[in-house]
Image: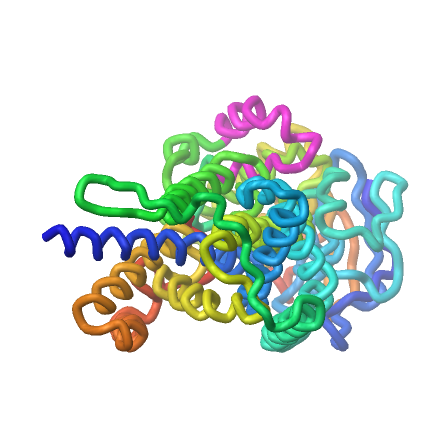
Amino acid sequence: MLELEAVDAGYGATTILHGVSLNVQAGEAVTIIGGNGAGKTTTLRTIAGLIRPTSGSIRFEGQDITRLEAHEVVELGITLIPEGRQLFPDMTVRENLLMGAFRRKAREQAEATLKEVLQLFPRVAERLDQIAGSLSGGEQQMVAIARGLMARPRLLMFDEPSLGLAPIIVEQVFSVIDRIVETGVTVLIVEQNVHHTLKAADRGYVLENGRIVLADAAEALLDNDHVRQAYLGI
Amino acid sequence: MDTFLQVLTNGLMLGGLFAIVSIGLTLIFGIVKVINFAHGEYLMVGMYLTFLLATGLHVHPYLTVAAVAPLLFVLGALTQRFLIQPLMSARDEHVQIFATVGLSTALMNLALLVFGADIASTPSSGLRTSLHLGPVRILLGQAVIFVVSIALVAALHWYLQRTQTGRAIRAVAQNRDAAQLMGINVNWIYILTFGIGAACVGLAASLVAPLYPTQPTSGTYFVLIAFVVVVLGGLGSIGGAFLGAMVIGLIDSLSGFYIGSDLREVAVFGVFLLILILRPSGLFGRKNLAHVSP
């Protein structure tokens, strides 16, 4: 479904990703793990079209999307739930969710999608008319995930969904992600919370200093010595 | 008492005038985050267009708005697409400000070249007749400007709150990156917003031209007040700009009558500075200037 081949990318003159190749098959939940500054966020932003690769190629369902603008990537069905939630702070929760359905293919069914999505997020349903900026961090993360689902994406990417959240909220976030995976949405997750994310995923890549150093089934990575030492602290 | 009512009314009418020339400026600032120093020259161009169309076609100046507003929309959209957008990636956003200063000078000198320094008078077409409302008198043209400025604020508010595109415009203003991730074409929203802001100036120009003389420097007269109004209203706030315009209009009128017409500007700018010292984000602005609150 998604294929990155030897992608170099970065900000200005700084190259962060060095020849990153990875793929995601339809229906899979794939994770990219790695430390701070390894290039996880850069990978997702590059796929989303916010950063243009300096070399290499990105294909989605057979189509070359390497040079597409971010809004064009969204139209194809790739949605990124960005790090730090990035809600529209002065809009109500409902308006935020409706913005999620801005994509042409999602727009007409927005109201129906909203009903579906709210079943996953009863707490969000209670706060539809509140200003998004006034919600707690955990609530905002739930809105951000719900807003991502509003696009009816074919590939949903999460960037550090548990960052800065209390442990109990982290559990809730991952249980929501589990349920999204169960519904058959293809998922690509980037996380520092390695244990949770490997439990939720089918396969994983380990990214270090902008290079993929390891790729395996998620269960195998949980048992991998390097992963255990470097990321699980065991 | 009647005199006081008249002075008060004059202030409100002046406020309507200030509001209608300021709304486009605050819209562009609030969304595109560019301070458009060519704003006054947009008004001047619109006034010349009104003059040319009204005298050339022998139509009522108000009818020219059907052409002037779309033409100004195009001027604004072109400014964003070919002047501002290429500079968006510049590290220093002041570059954009200098670009609009350059555009301002260029438009002014172009007008000087084409029309000369003489005053072009758009026919007033009966808009200078006085309406008697109880004890006060109002020029018909001023009353129209006042009413239209309220209607414009209401229309923009409706557009930004209730339409899909309007919501997208607000989304871009509040979080540009996130807006892109929703599938919004941010560059297109900027072009559209600049166009709408300039079209508002076009509307203002067709209403102002029959009452005020048109010359290459017409814009500079209004733009200084427009900046005061926009800052006072809280940069980027459309409703705030309207209220700011009323405040400035009233101060102008009251001080002109009770203190002396020479000291009007001293009063206006004195109060302006005082308010800025006490409330740096403007009378109706919030701390975070980055958001649009229509």
Residue A128 on image: x %, y %: 41, 34
Does B1 sit left or right of B15 as displayed?
left
Residue A206 on image: x %, y %: 73, 59
Q: Which residue is pictured at 45% across the width and 50% down the height?
A: A89
Residue A28 on image: x %, y %: 74, 38
Read off the magenta span: A95-120
Reply yes or no: does residue A105 show up in magenta: yes
Reply yes or no: does residue A225 show up in magenta: no
Q: Which residue is pictured at 24% across the width and 68% down the height?
A: B256
Front-most of A12 and B207? B207
Q: Which residue is pictured at 58% across the width and 54% down the height?
A: B198
Q: Is residue A219 something that shows in the picture? A: no
What is the magenta segment's predominant secondary structure? Answer: helix
Residue B226 on image: x %, y %: 44, 64
Colouring convention used in this rendered image of the protein: rainbow
> Does A229 sit above or below residue B27?
below
Does A163 sit left or right of B232 as displayed?
right
Q: Find residue B251 and report its image quarter.
A: bottom left
> Does B116 sit above or below residue B57?
below
Tell me how many marks there are.
0
